[in-house]
Amino acid sequence: MTGYRYGLYHGGPDPLEPPYDVRGAVDALGESVLNGDDPASALRDLLRRGMTDRRGLDDLLRQVRERQRQLRRSGRLDGILEQARALLDTAIGQERAELFPDPSDDARLRESELDALPNDTAGAIRDLSDYQWRSQAAAQTFEQLKELLRREVLDSQFRGIKETMSESGSEEMQRVKEMMAALTDMIEADARGDHTQQDFDSFMQQYGEFFPDSPQNLEQLVDDLVRRMAAAQRLLNSLTDEQRDELAGLMAQAMEDAGLAQEMARLADALRARRPDVDWDGQGSERMTGRDPLGLGAATSALAELADLAELEDALRQDYPGARLDDIDEEAVRRALGRQAVDDMEALRQIERELQRQGYLQNNEGKLELTPKAVRRLGDTALRKVFAKLAEGGYGEHDQHDVGQAGELTGSTRPWRFGDEQAIDTAATVRNALLRGGVPGRAAGGSEAGPGGGVADAGGRTAVRLSVSDFEIGETERRASAAVCLLVDLSYSMALRGTWSAAKQTALALYSLVRTRFPQDALQVIGFSNYARELRESDLAGLGWDMVQGTNLHHALVLAGRFLDRRPEQNPIVLVITDGEPTAHLRRDGSSWFDWPPSPETLELTMAEVDKMTRRRATLNVFMLADDERLSSFVDEVARRNGGRVLRALPDSLGEYVVSDFLRSRTARR
């Protein structure tokens, strides 16, 4: 038999992997859009907040700033000066202790030579470079000082190099010198176009121990070196003039003593020529607030990391025109915040990609918009939230049974009763006859009886004998059909009271309910301010309130009446959401008339439309979103003349009230 082996799929994306679930992102995005944000702003806010299982940009930004605070509290930048001065003073003290007991003129001459040393550390080290130490301990301390400076200066240029050097003797310094010469030659060759990846690989094979970060190509290596050189310059800029001169002298003296000054200068020139975009002489300064002294290499590393964090902070803020997540350097995130932060960033990028790929967002001439698919998702989510608040089993679909052949088959059957008009279920009827017939036998007239009491004819076919009790019919049902009008106040006061988002979510939930559970119903949503207009489902998410004067309920009722008149066979349901009394009406010429307090004509025309709704047998239920005396008086009169209900709802419970009332109205109209 052929054997099979199973392993990881390496042919690209896994074809069996389920699609990335962005439904939660759509819900979060939609919530912001319903509150008045445009989709682009809502997406930015979502990426800043993050999701339940992934950190957002704000969390990463807080982590970056916390790391910056830690670095600034890690120590002092002048620590190398303090360390060098302490070792120098120790060496001089050890030498004086050796000279003091000696009464010779040579001892006094040496003491005067020590007294004449310059005050700055670099100058003193330079003058002592040819001094013949009488004290062995002092000679060892001075050599320790020079070794410290060599290691620290090299570490300030090549991160981690001091850990890779077993010693800083002449042989090791010669190898460092050869490395710098080869590196400079490689950079210059690349500038001429003569460099290859093979050249870099050969260089790393020979000198790779000096670069613990293991760069993969020359560009990465140059970037690392440039970061270190820029940080070293920032370190100098952060010191006082006196400290800066002293440290620069120490660094130059250390490189000169090691025989590396010429190659270091040549490498620096090559890097400056390679990256002319870097402001080498004006890198700014940093204020470190720690108490512990930092070595030169550690201080340079801290400043290099602070520079990286500053760039990463700018990218994570995303507050510049055209900002995109792709602008954030993944390597900078990994270096500063670790692997988990990289995974969080990739999850955010995936959300942004998948929202468009799966059809929830679309780019229309540079403007980000919600698609109809996303709007339907928002309606479904709003409806789920509503039903989560409703009492279990409180509402159903209110079906009517025994409605004759005009109904829809349910898929079940029942025994026929006299007067039933439903179609006979042939298969169930014949099955009943066969089961009733019992064991086959001889039929009257000498013909062979078929199974179930049937008689076989000359052609061998079995004729089944049916009894009245065998007949079954298919059950049917007719679902009550309704024409639903939802009238939503679009006036500016809805936004001021914070009820506009709740009204939009309620409308979307009602759209979703009718679409999914009552497809036989017809729904029209009408928004009204100074004028009224029909609102489609796809318009609701991005719809804003109207900054105009007027609450023209009269016009809204006129449009609703036309909608109901076109559907006389359906049960009429009218729901009104408002936070104010009518203050506008439609004139004969089609213009809107506004007056406050409401003019008698406005109230009269509005009530006339209410009376028309009553004659249409349409119950008009009003949901009040404000506790206003004049509004209460108006809606109470509407309820008296129409027979509808007045419900005072809070924004958080508006959807629950409207959906519940819609279901109750369908039950009453069954």
Image (spheres, rainbow, N blue to C red):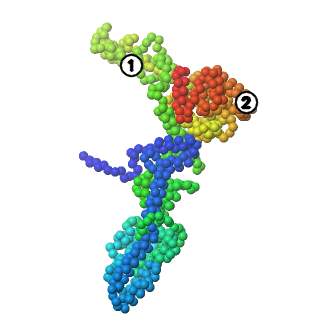
Depth check: give the residue in front, 157 or 97: 97
Amino acid on which the number 2 mark rests in the picture: Ser
Which residue is more in the foreground, 67 or 487? 67
For the point 54% across and 27% down, which residue is it? 662
Q: Secondary structure at mark 2?
A: loop
Asked if the residue at tag 1 contacts the one at tag 2, i.e. Cβ–Cβ closer than 8 Å, the answer is no
Q: Which amino acid type is marked by label 1?
A: Ala
Percent from the top left, x then y, of residue 666? 53, 24
Q: Is 198 displayed left or right of 666 in the figure?
A: left
Location of residue 510 with respect to 464 vertically, above or below: below
* SS under mark 1: helix
Checking the image for residue 599, the label placed there is: 2
Tell me which corner region of the image, top left, top right, bottom left or bottom right, holds residue 542: top right
Q: Is tag 2's residue or tag 1's residue first in the polypeptide sequence? A: 1
User: Residue 615 occupies which quadrant of the picture?
Assistant: top right
Task: Give the Cα separation between the discs numbered 2 and 1.
Answer: 69 Å
Q: Which residue is mark 1?
A: 428
The percent coordinates of residue 242 (x first, y second) are: 50, 75
- Compared across the picture, whether 616 is left or right of 301 comes to right
Specify few, some or many for label 1: CA neighbours under 10 Å numbering under 14, 14-19, or 20 or more: some
Q: Position of residue 649 (x, y in %)?
A: 56, 31
Rendered position, 375 above or below 187: above
